[in-house]
Amino acid sequence: MSATLTCRDFVEFLADYVADELEPEVRTSFDDHLAHCPSCVVYLHTYRDTRLLARAALQGPRAPVPGEVPEALVRAILEARRR
């Protein structure tokens, strides 16, 4: 793998990154990309928040939403459920 990771590469490795399953060389490139790409930092946070919210949803409709999940994301998901 080349030392420079693109945003497209970032998305392909995202699940493995969050699961802490990247090879050290890839992890270094991934972290370097995050250090220089604010858009991918936002994407990473949104991905993590979505996973937390999905886990909470699987616990049932009365399960509390984790505090770190942005309110805008919760509203968007609830709106999508109504459609």
Image: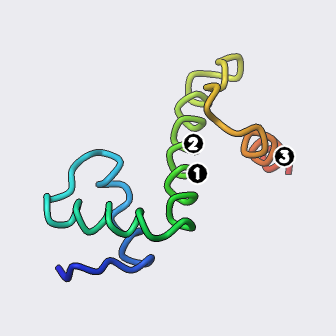
Q: Position of residue 71 (x, y in %)?
A: 76, 37
Mark 3 / mark 2, whichever is N-terminal: 2
| Residue marked by disc 1 | 46
Residue at mark 3 to residue at mark 1: CA–CA distance? 17 Å
Direction from residue 78 to residue 52 in the image, left or right? left
Three-letter amino acid code of the residue under disc 2: Asp
Please tell me whether mark 3 sits on a helix, a strand or a loop: helix
Eye-nearest disc, 3 or 2: 2
Picture coordinates of residue 76 (x, y %)? 79, 48
Q: Which residue is drawn at 61% across and 26% down?
A: 66
Q: Name the residue under label 3.
A: 79
Q: Distance between the residues labelled 1 and 2?
A: 5 Å
Q: Residue furthest left?
A: 24
Q: Which of marks 3 and 1 is in front?
A: 1
| Local SS, label 1 | helix
Q: Do the residues labelled 1 and 2 touch (CB within 8 Å)?
A: yes
Which of the 4 quarters of the picture holds residue 23?
A: bottom left
**Residue found 43% across the figure and 78% down from its top:** 8
